[in-house]
Amino acid sequence: MTSFPLPLGELFGHYGSYVVYLLVGLAFGATLETAGFGNSKKLAAQFYFKDLTVFKVMFTAIIVAGTLIFLSSALGLLDYNLVWVPPTYLWPGIVGGLIMGVGFIVGGFCPGTSLVAMATGKIDGVFFVLGVLSGIFLFGETVSNFDIFFESSYMGRFTLPELLGLDYGTVMLAVVVMALLMFWGAEKVESAVGGETAQKAPRWAVPASAALVALAAVNLAVGQPDNTDRWKMIEAEQAALLDGREVQISPAELLSLINDSQIKAVLLDVRDERYFNQFHIHGARRLPQEQVVDATRELMFEPANTVFVTMGNDETAATETWKMLKAESLPNVYILEGGVNNWLRTYGEDWFVQEHFLRNRENDQPAFRFDAALGSRQSAAEPNPHAFEIEFEPKVKLELKRAPTSGGCG
């Protein structure tokens, strides 16, 4: 798959990426200033329905960007899983939006446009930015007093398609049509309220709108790639890692990762519930294959030092889960070599290994019998790392976390 979003740090280096950020910021600021967004009177006028330029420009940017993003994803040019989507905290988000909205009305700026106004020497922009910085400081000093509410109603990476139960192409086409109808309504409102000062849409607005609807329709027709499609895009490269045994880590390396304070090991056990209940490694979470794609949205929010390890009884089911996670662009995913059976051979007590070994078993089935379903309370579930001196070839190499871990307001 083409590596988009672009890994700027890899392409231009640490300082070179900051030059790119600077150029993008300058271009964005110049665009806002050109659109008149450095003028607080023009910005505030939208709340009185006299000048809805802000609404039309920003909503146009949203639907154009959205259409191109999902069209690029549909064509395999962009990995949407690597595009930052801020997690939803419903009620804190609503309260924060109301506070910001009041500040926008009173001050005439949002944070981004206030920076544009300050950069062009406007006094009200300077004071607004000082107010923003003061608010950030006060928030940081007081958030501990209401952190329970601040972190409440967490919904993860929640978007309109999840809310409506529709595919991305349908939602995007509906949003484009809705936005164009709202633009038409906004012009009617401006004419009624603003009178002669109301601005009419340029002549090219109609063909541009038709072109945007056509692109959204193409996006709907092509459809977004599913997990199988994503795997086919990366199969040649990733299959080579599987065949070369470069992603299958030994039980000894996994035990080392679990006890490494600089690594967060997330153990993903893909076995049936009955096998998981009989025995599982301490700290492992059960992840049925039908839930893998949905679970990846949450796993993406794990810190950059996280290593994910899939495990089955042997390697068959764990390998299939590994493929699904890699297709969803989750970084640092490995497979437990030999699965839970190999873990038990390595760390199970000698008497248990000898007396409970099942000689006649099918592939990817348990190799040992358990008298009771004790889960992680079995003796081999949490071995003492100092009691075993097993040499292993380290295979884990932390990949650069491609998806950003924060977002912001323009």
Image: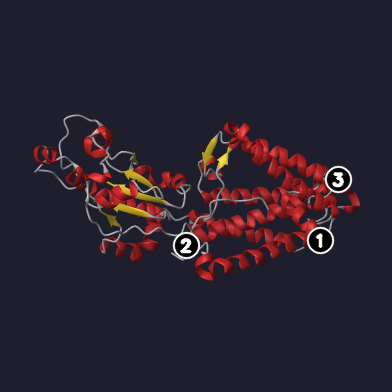
Amino acid type, residue under disc 3 in the picture: Ala
Q: Badge 1 local density, few (<14 within 10 Å), some, or many (20+)?
A: few
Q: Disc 1 marks which residue?
A: 120
Amino acid type, residue under disc 1 in the picture: Thr
Residue 395 appears at what percent x and percent y?
31, 59
Image position of 183 (left or right of 83): right
Task: Say above or below: 215 vs 189.
Answer: below
Of mark 1 and mark 3, the one earlier in the sequence is 1
Cα separation, mark 1 vs mark 2, equals: 41 Å
Residue 81 appears at what percent x and percent y?
48, 54
Residue 313 appears at what percent x and percent y?
22, 45
Of mark 3 and mark 2, the one earlier in the sequence is 2
Numbered mark located on residue 76 in the image: 2
Give the residue furthest to the right: 196
Point out the frontmost of discs 3 and 2: 2
Residue 35 image-quadrant placement: bottom right
Q: Which secondary structure lies at badge 3?
A: helix
Residue 102 appears at what percent x and percent y?
76, 39
Q: Is the image coloured rainbow, by chain, by secondary structure, or in one colour?
A: secondary structure
* Badge 1 vs badge 2, beta-carbon distance below 8 Å: no
Point out the frontmost of discs 1 and 3: 1
Numbered mark located on residue 317 in the image: none
